[in-house]
Amino acid sequence: MELIKKFEEISFTHLSRDKNQFADALATLAVMAQIEEGQMTQVLQIKARGEPDYCFMAKEEIDGKPWYHDVQVYVKTREYPLGASKNEKRMIRRLALGYFPSGEILYKRSSNGELLRCVDAKDAKKILFETHEGNCATHANGHMMAKQIMRRGYF
């Protein structure tokens, strides 16, 4: 009640349990932020999405080729895309250092030595959907999700 007096404007909104993730996020932000008394802050606006965030992570390929196509071609043949600039060629060479092919599949070695399979937007959306909404459900632990993904043949 003492803190309420220090704000110019304050409002309270009751959230149902299904909207509680916002309250959790705000509580986490409140603990992380160190704001001194009298310091002006910006208003925080939160917009709820109609779909889960992971649905927006995988972008469709414009040219029908996966995001890693240029790197995959360079790793296999040491050829650059037609019309690639000097900077683009340098970037492809640098990226290619961390990747290697196995047949038609391209892998990236992570910093801890694990192999990460490169997937296109279609496969990424399928994996995300099946992981979050399918057999794994949203509350499966990491081990269970990894087993389900491997069982489906993604790795």
Image (cartoon, rainbow, N blue to C red):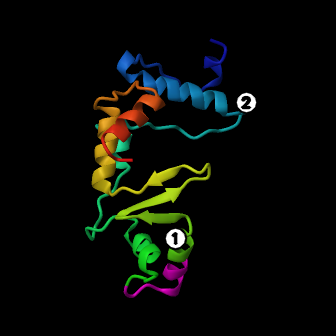
**In the image, what residue type sits under mark 1?**
Ala
13 in relation to 83, above or below: above
Q: Locate residue 130, reporting x and y percent.
A: 30, 37
- 152 sits left or right of 99 in the view: left
Between 114 and 95, the one nearer to me in the picture: 114
Q: Mark 1 or mark 2, which is nearer the start of the sequence? A: 2
Instruction: Say which residue appears at 59% left-offset and 51% top-offset.
Output: 113
Between 152 and 59, the one nearer to me in the picture: 152
Query: Per the image, is 102 magenta?
Result: no
Q: Locate residue 98, reporting x and y percent.
A: 55, 64
Between 107 and 45, the one nearer to me in the picture: 107
61 in relation to 134, above or below: below
128 in relation to 27, above or below: below
- Image quarter of the N terminus: top right
Q: Which residue is mark 2?
A: 37
Q: Which residue is mark 1?
A: 96
Disc nearest the viewer among 2 and 1: 1
Instruction: Say which residue appears at 51% left-offset and 24% top-offset.
Output: 24
The stretch in magenta equals 82-90
Instruction: Say which residue appears at 47% left-offset and 19% top-offset.
Output: 12
Q: Locate residue 77, reporting x and y percent.
A: 42, 80
Tag 1, which secondary structure?
helix
Would you call the spot at circle 2 few (<14 residues within 10 Å), some (14-19), or many (20 or more)? few
